[in-house]
Amino acid sequence: MAKWWRSAGTNLRLAAFSSARSESCPFSSSRAASYHTIQAIPRECSGSRISSRDRAQGRIPAVVFSQQILEKNPVHRSPSRKHLLTTEQKQIHSILKSVELPFFCSTRFKLQIRAGSGSSVLLESGSILPVKIHRDEETGKILNIVFVWADEGSELKVDVPIVFKGEETCPGLQKGGQLNRIRTSLKYLCPAEHIPSKIEVDVSNLDIGERIFIRDLDVHPSLKLLSRNEVMPICKIVTTNTETANTEISEPS
C-alpha cells in the first residue's frame, strides 16, 4: 500500500502551469452525474506524520490511479495516472450517508482536482470509482481512500453488492423457513458506464428448499462475470430447527 502513496504528487505539479486545460470534462454517465462531485487537492509527499496533519485539518488522504496498474501481466498495464490527493472529510462523510456504505465502492463519482483548497484552477477531472476505505481499527475513523479512474470506455473489476428483496411475501419464509444468503456480492468486469451499484435478487416466489443461481440473475449484457461457476447458488430457503421439530411433533406416531 505504501508504494501507492509515493511519487504521485509530482505528476500534478506541471499541470498547474497549464491552466488552459482546466475545463471540466463532460460525462455522459447518469450514474456519475447523479451524485456529488468529489473535490480534491494534490499532495506533494506522503508519510504518517503528513497524513496525520491532513486529517487534523479536516482532510482525508487519498490516491487515484488506473486499475490496470494492479495487473500482474505488464502487457495489460496502462499508464497509471496516479495522483496523491486529499479530500474534504465533511464531503466524504456526506456522500457515505447519502449513498450508503455497501454501495459506495460500486458507485461512480466525478472527481475534480484543483490547485489548492478554494482554488478555481482545475488540474484534472474525470470519473472515479472508490475501491477501498482504510479505517482505524479502534475508532473506525477513515484514514485514507483508494480510487481508480472510471472514465467511459474503460473496463473495471467491481465487487457488486447483492440486495435481497421480496422477503415479506416469500412463501418459504412464511412457512417458517430461513433465507440462507450464500453470496453477498459478485465480481464482474464492467464497462465504466454500466457499473451497477447493486444487484437485486427477488426471493418473493421461493419456497422451502428452492434456490436462485448466479445464472438466473438479470444484469446488463455487457457485464462479464469473473467466476466460472455460474451454477453456484446465491441463496436458498432452508428449514429451521424449530420448523423441523414442529413437523415431527405434528406427525402421527
Image (cartoon, rainbow, N blue to C red):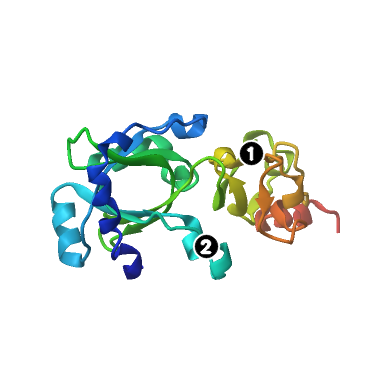
Give the residue displayed 33% in from the left and 42% down from the top.
124
| Residue 105 marker | none
Q: Nearer the viewer, residue 51 or 166?
A: 51
Seen as rendered, the residue at the extreme right is: 253
Residue at x 68%, y 60% (from the top left corner):
227
Q: Residues within 10 Å of mark 2 (few under 14, many from 20)?
A: some
Residue at 65% from the left image edge and 35% from the top image edge: 166
- Expressed as whole percent of the image width and height from the top left, the position of residue 46 reads 22, 63
Q: Residue at x 32, y 54 (%)?
A: 83
Compared with 99, 54 (above or below) is below
Give the residue type at disc 1.
Glu
| Kind of residue sitting beneath label 2 | Arg
Q: Secondary structure at mark 1?
A: helix
Query: Does the rendering let one see residue 39?
Result: yes
Whichever of labels 2 and 1 marks the residue nearer the N terminus, that label is 2
Label 2 sits on a secondary structure element that is: loop
Question: What is the distance, in whole Å, between disc 2 and disc 1 at their CAs?
Answer: 44 Å
Residue ID for mark 1 = 167
- Counting from the top left corner in percent of width and height, residue 2 is at 32, 69
Q: Quadrant of the N terminus?
A: bottom left
Q: Which residue was labeled with disc 2? A: 77
